[in-house]
Image: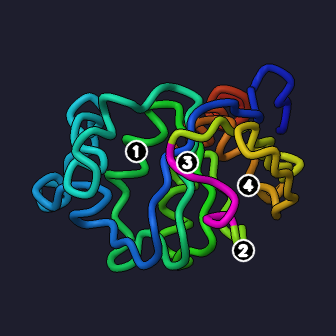
């Protein structure tokens, strides 16, 4: 299924750094939107990181990269924050995150590398970063630091490229499902 020739797996943008043990509900997305089960990106985007970094939305641009520490998105594996990140066109690298959180982030199509040991030591908020999510190459252009991290697994790339599980199902229906239904 993978034809990723037109998909941009490399992001060049500003770093937005967050620390260790950052829970999803509150620090990443205001709990109100989780409780209300909001999934509309236009509603969620303005509230991304508003409790932990109130100026984030003013600074964040398409192509920017979230860098976070260990245990990012701890707690319940809610998707609202990842929906907002994906809608903004952000990428993310973290030292670790719970498996169910990782699954939630990939399921909405977020470009994410989640086993990047020591990445928080390689970047600060405002640094210019260049990250290739297929090769795992991380370059901090501001500090002249280059690292190799585990890339997005090949088996998950179609899910990310197609915008998450909804995109995968839509693609399947358009290419295979209609044939099977006929």
Can you tell which of label 1 and label 4 is closer to the viewer? 1
Start-end of magenta stretch: 119-125
- Pointer 1 or 4: first along the chain: 1
Can you tell which of label 2 and label 1 is closer to the viewer? 2
Return the residue nearer the eye: 118 or 1.
118
44 sits to left or right of 93? left
Kindly state the secondary structure of the residue where label 4 is placed: helix
In 3D space, how far apart are the residues under numbered discs 3 and 1 (Cα atoms)?
12 Å
- Pointer 2 or 4: first along the chain: 2
Can you tell which of label 2 and label 3 is closer to the viewer? 2
Instruction: Give me the residue at 59% from left, 29% from top.
Output: 63
Labelled disc at residue 83: 1
Labelled disc at residue 165: 3
Labelled disc at residue 156: 4
- Pointer 3 or 4: first along the chain: 4
Q: Would residue 68 be seen by someone viewing this image from the given angle? A: yes
């Amino acid at each position: 299924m993978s034809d990723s020739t037109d998909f941009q797996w490399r992001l060049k943008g500003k770093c937005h750094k967050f620390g260790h043990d950052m829970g999803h509900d509150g620090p990443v997305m205001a709990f109100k939107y989780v409780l209300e089960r909001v999934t509309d990106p236009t509603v969620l985007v303005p509230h991304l990181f508003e409790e932990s970094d109130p100026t984030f939305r003013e600074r964040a641009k398409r192509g920017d990269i979230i860098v976070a520490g260990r245990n990012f998105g701890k707690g319940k594996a809610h998707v609202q924050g990842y929906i907002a990140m994906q809608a903004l066109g952000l990428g993310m690298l973290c030292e670790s995150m719970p498996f169910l959180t990782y699954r939630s982030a990939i399921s909405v199509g977020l470009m994410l590398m989640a086993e990047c040991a020591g990445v928080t030591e390689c970047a600060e908020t405002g640094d210019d970063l260049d990250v290739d999510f297929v090769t795992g190459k991380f370059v901090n252009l501001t500090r002249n630091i280059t690292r190799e991290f585990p890339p997005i697994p090949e088996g998950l790339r179609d899910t990310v490229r197609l915008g998450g599980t909804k995109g995968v199902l839509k693609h399947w229906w358009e290419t295979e499902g209609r044939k099977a239904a006929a």
